[in-house]
Every structure is written in structure tokens, then in C-alpha cells.
Image (tube, rainbow, N blue to C red):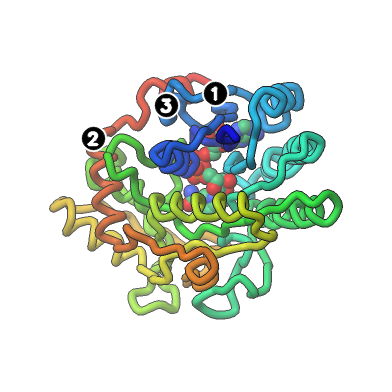
Amino acid sequence: MSQKYYLFTGAAGYVGSHVLSFFLEREKKCIILDNLSKGYREAVPADIPFFQSDISDVEILNQIFNTYPVAGVLHFAGFIEVGESVKNPGKYFENNVSKAIPFLEVVRKCRIPWVLFSSSAAVYGEPVENPISESFPLRPTSPYGLTKLMMEEMLQVYERSFGIRSVCLRYFNASGAHPSGNLGEAHLPESHLIPLACQASLNLIPFLSMYGMDYPTPDGTCIRDYVHVWDLAQAHFLAAEALDKGLASTVYNIGSEKGYSVREVIENLEKISGRKVPVQTAGRRPGDPAVLVASSKKIRQELSWVPQCQSLDKILSSAYQWHKKHPDGFTKSLKNHQEA
Ligand SMILES: NC(=O)c1ccc[n+]([C@@H]2O[C@H](COP(=O)([O-])OP(=O)(O)OC[C@H]3O[C@@H](n4cnc5c(N)ncnc54)[C@H](O)[C@@H]3O)[C@@H](O)[C@H]2O)c1
């Protein structure tokens, strides 16, 4: 039987483009659907079928599923900014949840067997303790986190009603860049610590804002679990292979199981780059828990996930190299976003 395709939604974005690259390097056939509201055409190869379209575009989805034999869907598309979701929750409910309904309807009508969904540690909200395992209570503190939980629950319903299997990968802090140095993080606006710290150290932005110095942590700054985007890509690959072989629906945390404070990240970046990171201190951001560290035991045991790029040094040096080599990110598209 000829090899089937994987449909990637949101593959022109940060995580999707890296996972796509991981799949292509392993000679998998892939199709991309992305409306380029946030992603970059240059982040994905020109010779892969690319549909510049919204996930709610039923006509295009039908066209894709009727043209290509699709084994499963990797669903990255969505808006990702916690702060914006607090200010404008409707935008997040519409894009991350409402638009997923016509999408899931086509998936079921075209009998696509499974969906691999980009969920988030944000579904846990303030954790009862650390490390966080998948069985912990789900109490998101932001509309963004709630949209991730709503999607997880919708996927459970689609399994019960129609037998569409799903795996939800709850990422902790995705970070780092492609080992080649040609692909990396280019969110616009950027809200993540590591890219902002790299940009500040390269004088691409005036300073890094450090939110909250009075958390109950050893140095007073928040502690997070940073997982290399290439390890995240490997987790998707293992999950897709397992789904192809009939894996039942489940959820997995994807984290390094180690926590680093904001100060530690900055200090390590300064050592790696040999440059100072200019910092300005600011108050706490509402809803930011003091510590978020994953237990990733479940995926390590069940799918034999063995992260290869886990150290903070590897994450920081790959991110720093990307920003140094690409101070304007994906230049052409960046211009398009600014003009939009
Ligand atoms: N980056 C992280 O640390 C992180 C952590 C946890 C979860 N996630 C999840 O992973 C996924 C990818 O995150 P990312 O950092 O790559 O974000 P990103 O913004 O870089 O990529 C998202 C992509 O989805 C596309 N998109 C958005 N809405 C769309 C729509 N309605 N139709 C078609 N395309 C659409 C955008 O154009 C973009 O290319 C998101 O679902 C996010 O919630 C990311």
C-alpha cells in the first residue's frame, strides 16, 4: 500500500514547522494547512502541498481529504498568547474552539482515524504540587488554557460518538531551535522568555522584562520547565506512529522534568553568549504560577520517548544561534505581518 499523508494544521508556526521538518527528515508525506495569520510561508519547504486556508474552511478540507489519503491530522493551529486571551477571550474561543467544530466535522465525515492535538500545561492552572502528572486537576486560569481544555474534551466526545482517536500532548515551555540553525522561534509579538532574552542580549529589543521577583522560589523568580522543540518533535513522531498502530486516546505531558528560574535562564544565556542581557524588573503577571514542572513519566514509559536535546545549554545555544543568524526572523513574512 502506498504511504499515507499526515495533515499538519498550523505548520507554518514555531512548533509545527519543527515537527514537520522532523517528519520530512524521516521521509513521511505531509500536507500543510495554515492561514498564515501568525506563521511564515518561509518556515516550511516550498515543495510540500500547502493550503493557505483557515481550519474552518470546509471546502478546502474536503478537497484535501478527497485528494490525498490522510492517515491522521496533527493539529497545531491556534492562537497562543495567554495575556491577549485575558484581554480578548472571544478571539480565543472563536479561533481555538468554534473554528475547530467545522474542522472536526469534516474529519469525522471523511473518516480520518485520529487527531494529534497541541495542548498545553495551561490546562492545569495553579498546580496542587510539582512535578505535575496527567492525573492532576484541570483548572485553567486563563481563557487560552480553557480553550485547550475545551478542545481536549471535544476530542473525547468525538471519540465516544464517532471513534476518532486522539492524543493530546500537553507541552510545557517549548523552546530552542532546529539543529541546522535555519528554523527557529519567530512569534509576533513575542511573549516567551528565551526568545526575548536572546533578542535583548543581541540588542534587538531594548531590554527583557522580568515579571515578579517575590515568588516563593529560591531566587524569587518563576520556575518553568523548558522542553527542546526537537524533543517535542520526536514526541509527535512517536505518538503519530503509535496512533497509526491503533493507540487508544490519551494525554501526555511533554516536559524536561527540570525547572529553571527566570534568573537561571538569563545567567546561563549570558554565559553562552558572552553578552549581558539587559533586564527591567516589573510586577507579577496575574495568573502566573510560581512553579510549573512536568512529570513526563507516562510518555517515557508508554511511547519510549527519550529526549535527546534536554539540557538548558542546548536549548539556549540553539535559540541564541537562530536569533543571531536571523535578527529579523523570517524577514519577508515579518514584513507582511507588520503591514497586515
Ligand atoms: N509555543 C509553546 O511554548 C506552546 C506551549 C503549549 C502549547 N502550544 C500550542 O502549540 C501550538 C503551536 O504553537 P506555536 O508556538 O507554534 O504557535 P504559532 O503562533 O507559532 O503557530 C500557530 C500557527 O497556526 C496558524 N493558525 C492560527 N489560527 C489558524 C486558523 N484558524 N486556521 C489556520 N491556521 C491557523 C498560524 O498562522 C500559525 O502558523 C498552538 O496550538 C499552541 O497553543 C505551544
Residue pictured at 47% horizontal, 72% vertical:
291
Residue pictured at 47% horizontal, 70% vertical:
293
Q: Would you say residue 189 is visible in this rendering?
A: no
Alpha carbon distance from label 3 to label 1: 9 Å
Task: Point out residue 262 in the picture as x, y percentages from the top left corner.
Answer: 35, 63
Kindly give the residue lying farthest to the right in the view shown.
Answer: 161
Task: Choose top left, top right, bottom left or bottom right for residue 142.
Answer: bottom right
Kindly give the residue lying farthest to the left in the view shown.
Answer: 274
Q: Residues within 10 Å of mark 3 (few under 14, many from 20)?
A: some
Specify the quadrant that holds the N terminus.
top right
Disc nearer the start of the sequence (2/3): 3
Task: Point out residue 260 in the picture as x, y percentages from the top left corner.
Answer: 36, 68
Q: Amino acid at mark 1?
A: Phe
Disc nearer the start of the sequence (2/1): 1
Identify residue for label 3: 45
Is the CB atom of the residue marked by disc 3 within 8 angstroms of ligand 1's nearest atom? no
Q: Secondary structure at mark 2?
A: helix
Identify residue for label 1: 50
Judge whether 128 appears above or below 155 on screen: below
Identify residue for label 2: 325
Q: Amino acid at mark 2?
A: Lys
Callouts 2 and 3 close, C-beta under 8 Å: no
Q: Secondary structure at mark 1?
A: strand
